[in-house]
Image: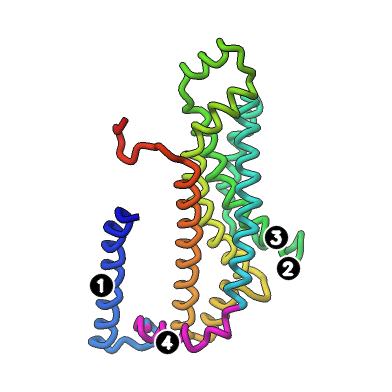
């Protein structure tokens, strides 16, 4: 904890300095608020209109969490299946890569046409952006398991299932958590994009309404809360990683 506090002040100091520089520049150059509002103006707007967007924030948070859980579960399941079935992996891994080459902006209108404006197309979008990082990271983690340890377990009479559950899966946990961190931030992004394309509430809706009325300060308020959600989700995954994975060397090359 002490180490985290000692290292955590540096990024905080950088952020504070950037905000101060932003505030001073806005006053010196008299930048119009509709073009680039000052940080104090954004904070005042966020504090005074909390009741107007609190339900939007709750809606986006719930949608992000649900989509993250579904997407990472599907991604991890796909990774396990492709790892356990090498021939299936050879056939479907290229399709896994191609699934990420479809722009969400292009796919989203089709999902709305097919499934309407309910929660299903939104969850589909979040799942699409969340499952890929965890699937690829888990596959890499499984593949990098120590070959000598696997050979030893097979010689000791272990089954394929035992090798996976007792060696490959624990060995891949650091890679899995790396994928979870990426997916956690992607889930918020996917939720906001899905709300842009059709929703009744959410940070994406709040941002769209603010943009259409040229309320740049409210757009920055929405951006701020998107960043906070991403950092919060990332921190929760990081905390869970520290609780579940212990004894890892903190520096490369440390025994």
Q: Residues within 10 Å of mark 4 (few under 14, many from 20)?
A: few
Q: Is residue 28 magenta?
A: no
Q: Is residue 39 magenta?
A: yes
Mark closer to the chain start, 1 or 3: 1
Residue 101 drawn above or below residue 139: below
Q: CA distance from mark 4 to mark 1?
A: 19 Å
Mark closer to the chain start, 3 or 4: 4
Number of the label disc, if any, that sits on residue 121: 3
Point 25% across, 86% down: residue: 29
Mark closer to the chain start, 4 or 1: 1
Local SS, label 3? helix
Front residue (pair 44, 245): 245
Query: Marks 3 and 2: CB-CB under 8 Å?
Result: yes
Camera sees residue 107: no
Q: Which residues are magenta?
A: 37-54
Q: Is residue 49 left or right of residue 86?
A: left
Mark closer to the chain start, 1 or 2: 1
Point 57% across, 73% down: residue: 57
Dominant SS type (magenta): helix
Mark closer to the chain start, 2 or 4: 4
Foreground: disc 2 or disc 4: 4
Residue furthest left in the image: 28
Residue named by callout 2: 117
Q: CA distance from mark 3 to mark 2?
A: 7 Å
Local SS, label 4? helix
Foreground: disc 1 or disc 2: 1
Quadrant occupied by the C terminus: top left
Residue named by callout 1: 17
């Amino acid at each position: 904890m002490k180490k985290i506090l000692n290292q955590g002040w540096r990024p905080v100091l950088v952020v504070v300095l950037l905000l101060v520089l932003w505030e001073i520049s806005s006053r010196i150059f008299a930048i119009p608020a509709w073009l680039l509002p000052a940080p104090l103006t954004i904070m005042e707007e966020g504090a005074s209109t909390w009741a107007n967007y609190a339900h939007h924030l709750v809606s986006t948070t719930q949608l992000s969490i649900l989509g993250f859980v579904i997407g990472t579960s599907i991604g991890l399941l796909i990774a396990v299946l492709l790892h356990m079935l090498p021939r299936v992996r050879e056939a479907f891994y290229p399709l896994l890569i191609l699934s990420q080459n479809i722009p969400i902006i292009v796919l989203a209108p089709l999902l709305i046409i097919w499934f309407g404006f309910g929660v299903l197309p939104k969850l589909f979008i979040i799942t699409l952006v969340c499952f890929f990082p965890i699937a690829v990271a888990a596959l890499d983690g499984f593949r990098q398991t120590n070959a000598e340890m696997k050979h030893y377990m097979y010689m000791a009479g272990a089954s394929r299932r035992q090798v996976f559950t007792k060696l490959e899966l624990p060995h891949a946990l650091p890679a899995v958590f790396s994928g979870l961190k990426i997916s956690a931030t992607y889930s918020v992004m996917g939720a906001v994009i899905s709300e842009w394309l059709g929703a009744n509430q959410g940070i994406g809706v709040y941002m769209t309404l603010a943009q259409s009325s040229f309320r740049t300060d409210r757009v920055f308020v929405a951006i701020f809360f998107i960043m906070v959600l991403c950092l919060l989700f990332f921190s929760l995954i990081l905390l869970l990683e520290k609780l579940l994975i212990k004894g890892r060397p903190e520096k490369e090359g440390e025994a």
